[in-house]
Amino acid sequence: MSTTTSTTTTILRAEGFSCPSCVAKIEKQVGRLKGVESVKVHFASARVEVVHDPAVASTEDLVAAVAKAGYKATPAAF
């Protein structure tokens, strides 16, 4: 059974993480959200790249999930 969902990629800028284990924490927390297909945290640039279905997981949901992991994130303009 194949369903076509319209996914989008959202880039967040994260603040306050300083170690590779923080990356895993953020990826796990955001990855748990319904509608999230993949999460990739770019440690060096502090960017969180999330492929998600915006109808299920909004940008606000993603930011909230990062906050739940203990970090501040804001949607990136690029």
Image (spheres, helix red, strand yellow):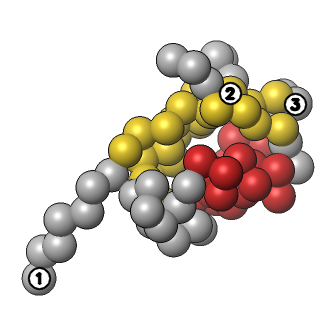
Disc 2 secondary structure class: strand
Name the residue at the bottom extreme: 1
Name the residue at the front extreme: 55
Direction from residue 5 to residue 65 in the image, left or right: right
Quarter of image, res 28? bottom right
Instruction: Say above or below: 19 vs 61.
Output: above
Query: 41 or 60: nearer the eye?
Result: 60
**Which residue: 65% across, 17% down?**
44
Q: Earlier in the sequence, mark 1 or mark 2?
A: 1
**Which residue: 42% across, 47% down?**
51
Q: If the image is split into quadrants, where does the N terminus sit?
A: bottom left
Residue 25 at least partly seen: no
Distance from Cα at disc 3 to Cα at disc 2: 10 Å
Q: Which residue is mark 2?
A: 13
Q: Which mark is residue 1?
A: 1
Distance from Cα at disc 1 to Cα at disc 2: 35 Å
Amino acid at dot 1:
Met
Amino acid at dot 2:
Arg
Disc 1 secondary structure class: loop
Q: Position of residue 25 (x, y in %)?
A: 73, 52
Disc 3 secondary structure class: loop
Q: Position of residue 13 (x, y in %)?
A: 68, 27
Query: 24 or 35: nearer the eye?
Result: 35
Distance from Cα at disc 3 to Cα at disc 1: 41 Å
Q: Residues within 10 Å of mark 1 (few under 14, many from 20)?
A: few
Q: Nearer the viewer, mark 3 or mark 2?
A: 2
**Which residue: 75% across, 54% down?**
64
Q: Which mark is residue 16?
A: 3
